[in-house]
Amino acid sequence: MPTFAMIPPLLIGATDLAAAFLFMYGLKRMSSPVTAASGILVAGFGMIAAILASFLYVFGVSDAARPHLQINIVLAAVALIIGGGASWWAGKKVAMTAMPQMVALYNGMGGGAAGAIAAMELFGNKTQGATQLVVTLLGALIGAISFSGSLIAWAKLQGILKHPLRIKGQQWINGIFMLATLAVGGYIAFVNTSGATPLMAMPSLIYLFFALALVFGILMTLPIGGADMPVVISIYNAFTGLAVGLEGFVLQNPALMIAGMVVGAAGLLLTLLMAKAMNRSVSNILFTNFGAPKKHKQGAIKGRLKPVDAGDAGIYMRYASSVIIVPGYGLAAAQGQQKLYEFVKLLQAGGVLVRFAIHPVAGRMPGQMDVLLAEAGVPYDLIFQLEDINDDFANTDVALVIGANDVVNPAARTDKSSPIYGMPILNVDKAKRVYVIKRGEGKGYAGIVNALFYGDNCDMVYGDAQVVLIKMIEAVRGLGLSAAA
Amino acid sequence: MEFQITMTGFVAIYIFMLAAFAGWVIIGRVPAILHTPLMSGSNFVHGIVVVGGIYALLNASTLQEQIIGFFAVLLGAGNAAGGYAVTHRMLAMFQPSAHKTTHAKHGHAKVTHLKKA
């Protein structure tokens, strides 16, 4: 006989099922630029439905919570409105160049939420059996690390923390904190399952556990440098997904389990892709100080740096038949994307074939340069990834490198002693002529001299990318040529 | 008929395993050009944690639980709303060439590549 009590769980179950489907379908639609925009819309519907349905939980609250139900409903609604509203507003306002830190921040929030849910389960002693307890602790650990680690990543990307903080014996300190966190977590599990009397009150133990996990997340992220951020953001994305999935198991909510694990796998895949593009292992990025000065024997480099005038370089490109542009983080730092596309349109109007070549780790998060070019209005069919365009450099008139260094360093191909040896690079040096727009004669992130800049076919254009591009635009306009000459 | 869902032991592991495979396969097909929106899109998807936060908060019976629960929902809602906002903004920016002129051939080659990838 169906009763009213059966309806809320049925509705929640059906909605969560639909939400899980919509998330997967939405992510699948994101696999092509043509359908991607509708993909996020689909996933958004799933989210709204799942949140609305979750208020049906009021019909099944525990007896202990029943007297507080009204307050709890108000609290939930207020938290939803404030948290959702503030984040929505910030997400609409933020500059595209600040996207990596924004994603890091939102990711940290998700990790924090998963950690908070675990904390409630632990403080309220609501878990049933050893398995649930261990899974809760694991989710709490991963969520807390993701929370504090993402906040540090945000502070670094935002420029609040300017330099990677490295102290002697850092790996040992990190290791000790990790072990201490695991030990306290293990002790909590032991006390709860065996019924032994704990050395200190249980709530204090739980606080200690979270404090240690949070500190570990901070310590782990502090030494990591700016150019390694794509890997860090990917890995914390995976962490939060995993934490959400684990807490989904504790709450017996399959939508959380599925969504969390899908994101966990996705984040892991992206992490591995990024590490591969740097030719380094994930552990190497997380646990060694790549940016630290290395004693590296630099082979003598023949040739000299040849500075040229921006206007001359611009005019040369106007008369070329094909140009490939390699943008790096320096372009974004100089906010030069708009001017770049303006220059590109001038070249296109003159019949020059212009394409963009993007290195997988260009920028501060995977694919950041693609987004910045898209924002400037560059159509996505002009943007090519490394493996699709690398062979074309050899028969291209001009390669224009803007604010990129290590990803075009031929030492990665030839010099076995180089720290970046084996990293896939864009074969810019094979183009007939290379122009490099650069702020000064400084070295790249890895601190390696770039032989490309000394090559016979390479000229340097020094200056801020935006200023240089404005000069190039003026020079080409000054020619007074009609379109398609 | 019972609509309460219980997932224990192997059933939970099966769900985790299949979801991880699905995530791996779906994401593996996304071209590098979309990696940033994809990452913020998957970031949005784990905002579903807000649902768990709401469940936990509604079942809170002490002040401490109410405070932590409030933050769980606050942070989860921030994750979901912000993730959606930035992903939607970014994806709306990806546009193909308006009129295919001299580069029509290249544009076409790219699109077929993306479909295949």
Image (cartoon, coloured by chain):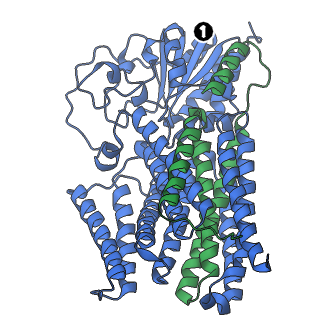
Q: Is residue A352 above or below residue A184?
A: above
Q: Is residue B82 above or below residue A121?
A: above
- Using the rendered view, name the quadrant where residue A181 is placed: bottom left
Instruction: Tell me the element at label 1.
Output: loop
Q: Could you say where residue A357 lies in the image, as x and y percent from the top left? A: 55, 24
- Using the rendered view, name the quadrant where residue A11 is placed: bottom right
* B71 or A333, nearer to the observer: B71
Q: Quadrant of the N terminus of chain A?
A: bottom right
- Residue located 64% across and 19% down the image: A475
Q: Is residue A243 above or below residue A295?
A: below
Position of residue A232 in the picture relative to residue B24 (left or right): left
Q: Could you say where residue A166 lies in the image, as x and y percent from the top left? A: 28, 54
* A413 or A24, nearer to the observer: A24
- Residue located 48% across and 56% down the image: B13
Q: Colour of chain A?
A: blue
Q: Could you say where residue A420 lies in the image, as x and y percent from the top left? A: 32, 30
- Residue located 59% across and 18% down the image: A314
What is the residue that sits farthest to the bottom in this orientation?
A67
Look at label 1 and name its amino acid: Ala
Position of residue A134 in the picture relative to residue A470 (left or right): left
Q: Colour of chain B?
A: green
Question: Label 1 lies in what chain?
Answer: A
* Residue A93 visible to an observer of this rendering: no
Q: Quadrant of the C terminus of chain A?
A: top right
Q: Which residue is mark 1?
A: A320
* Residue A35 visible to an observer of this rendering: yes
Badge 1 crowding class, 10 Å Cα cut-off, few under 14, some 14 to 19, many 20 or more, is some
* A303 or B97, nearer to the observer: B97
- Residue located 43% across and 59% down the image: A149
Q: Is residue A402 above or below residue B44?
A: above
Q: How many marks?
A: 1
Q: Could you say where residue A75 lies in the image, as x and y percent from the top left? A: 67, 81
